[in-house]
């Protein structure tokens, strides 16, 4: 027998559908939302809707932005000879927190995973190759997570990029195998970047 109101149950289920949120956390979040004033709840829902409606991919690097190009691609002070390839926008945030990397990024929005039906055509691979085909880029750093899918994606991209005459490097293994970049601390990320290896 269910004791919760239908709307509350649905709210809990929506929170539970988010990654990393279990049922207990989902319940806690749902009850917190119900304790908000109408104004606070409206501001919360408006923020979700606005983000969903206005945020898009940067036309250059595919990072999230609400403009045509993201602030990083638009920054003329960044080193345009190096591109760091990452799986998702949250990985860009992780590298930016180090305050040590001054190059550009390219966000794939996923990794090659045949088991999940994800191939190169589902990722932003063509856009990366187009960027590297110019004369400006000298090095591409593969900063995918050190997982089976991350390694497979890095090796696949390296094969495509090497004939274009650029140096292709991989993050050094200061990051534990199987770990997510977003949870790595700034020092570990910087050391991994500093000690990257050519692949």
Image (cartoon, rainbow, N blue to C red):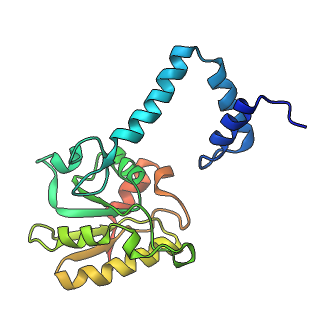
Q: Residue at x 26, y 52 (%)?
A: 58
Q: Nearer the viewer, residue 182 or 6?
A: 6
Q: Nearer the viewer, residue 177 or 133?
A: 133
- Residue 40 % position (x, y): 52, 18
Left or right side of 173 for 27:
right
Quadrant placement of the C terminus: bottom left
Q: Is residue 70 above or below residue 153?
A: above
Please tell me which residue is depicted at 19% across the width and 71% down the height of the picture.
130
**Place of residue 30 in the rendered image (x, y in percent of width and height, measured from the top left):** 67, 30
86 in relation to 11, above or below: below
Of residue 121 and residue 82, the one placed in the foreground of this image is 121
Q: How many marks?
A: 0
Left or right of 26: which side holds 53? left
Residue name at image x 45 percent, y 63 percent: 174
Find residue 45 and report its horizontal and vertical position in percent.
50, 29
Residue in view at x 56 percent, y 15 percent: 38
User: Can you tell which quarter of the image residue 36 is in?
Assistant: top right
Residue 155, quarter of picture: bottom left
Q: Residue most toward the right? A: 1
Q: Is residue 33 above or below residue 102?
A: above
* Residue 55 spot, x, y in % from top left: 34, 43
Extreme residue toward the left, this view: 135
Which image quarter is the N terminus in? Answer: top right
| Rendered image quadrant of residue 190 | bottom left
């Amino acid at each position: 027998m269910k004791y919760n109101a239908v709307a509350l149950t649905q709210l809990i289920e929506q929170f539970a559908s988010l990654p990393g949120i279990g049922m207990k956390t989902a319940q806690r979040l749902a009850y917190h939302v119900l304790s908000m004033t109408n104004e606070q709840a409206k501001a919360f829902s408006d923020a979700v809707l606005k983000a969903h409606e206005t945020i898009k991919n940067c036309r250059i690097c595919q990072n999230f932005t609400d403009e045509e190009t993201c602030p990083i691609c638009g920054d003329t002070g960044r080193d345009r000879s190096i591109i760091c390839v990452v799986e998702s926008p949250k990985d860009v945030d992780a590298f930016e927190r180090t305050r040590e990397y001054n190059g550009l990024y390219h966000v794939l929005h996923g990794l090659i995973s045949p088991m999940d039906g994800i191939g190169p055509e589902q990722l932003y691979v063509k856009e990366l190759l187009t960027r590297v085909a110019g004369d400006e880029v000298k090095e591409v750093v593969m900063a995918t997570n050190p997982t089976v899918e991350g390694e497979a994606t890095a090796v696949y991209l390296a094969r495509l990029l090497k004939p274009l005459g650029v140096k292709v490097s991989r993050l050094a293994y200061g990051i534990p195998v199987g770990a997510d970049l977003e949870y790595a601390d700034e020092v570990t990320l910087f050391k991994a970047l500093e000690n990257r290896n050519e692949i």
